[in-house]
Image: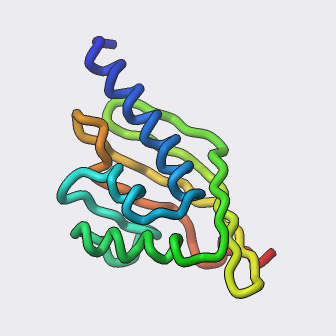
Amino acid sequence: MTVEQETLTDKMSAAVDSYIDRLTEGNAEKIVELYAEGATVEDPIGTEVRTTREQLLEFYTIIQNLDDRTATLKWKKVAGDTAVFEFTLVTHTAGMAFEITPVDIMVFNEEGKIVSMRAVWAQEDLKTL
């Protein structure tokens, strides 16, 4: 492994950790800062791919507008330009609580910014607590 690759691996690992922290924080702008210009988000896989910064902000504003949210990283694997990780997201809104445990696949550019995110989960994975 080259020094450049180690550095990218470190950047990708840190970006995943930041993503989890920022989901919990719930600030859509800060989450979108992790993405490269022109990045795509398909969450969940099979839905329309979001391709603009405005679409990403709109998507993450859903998380921001919840009463409370806690994301907890379960595991992550980082190799090449890709990170795959599973996390649990517990949210509270309007007196109700929900939990989902997706697996995200992120591809990164050489600066360690996300260029593609695909989330693997289905509607039946969303649990009411």
For the C terminus, the quadrant is bottom right
Determine the image quadrant of residue 2: top left
Determine the image quadrant of residue 55: bottom left
- Which residue is located at x 51 percent, y 53 percent? 22
Residue farthest to the bottom, as pictured: 94
Residue 17 location (% of width, % of height): 52, 41
Q: Is residue 78 left or right of residue 91?
A: left
Query: Compared to 54, does 82 lie above or below?
Result: above
Residue 16 location (% of width, % of height): 47, 43
Q: How is the image coloured?
A: rainbow
Residue farthest to the right, as pictured: 129
Query: Compared to 57, does 3 lie above or below?
Result: above
Q: Is residue 120 left or right of residue 28?
A: right
Most foreground residue, 19 or 81: 19
Residue 83 location (% of width, % of height): 43, 40
Determine the image quadrant of residue 60: bottom left
Residue 69 location (% of width, % of height): 65, 65
Query: Compared to 20, does 65 lie above or below?
Result: below
- Which residue is located at x 37 percent, y 62 percent? 29
- Which residue is located at x 55 percent, y 50 percent? 20
Q: Is residue 64 left or right of residue 7?
A: right
Most foreground residue, 42 or 66: 66
- Which residue is located at x 30 percent, y 37 percent? 112
For the N terminus, the quadrant is top left
Label count reads: 0
Q: Is residue 27 left or right of residue 54?
A: right
Residue farthest to the left, as pictured: 38
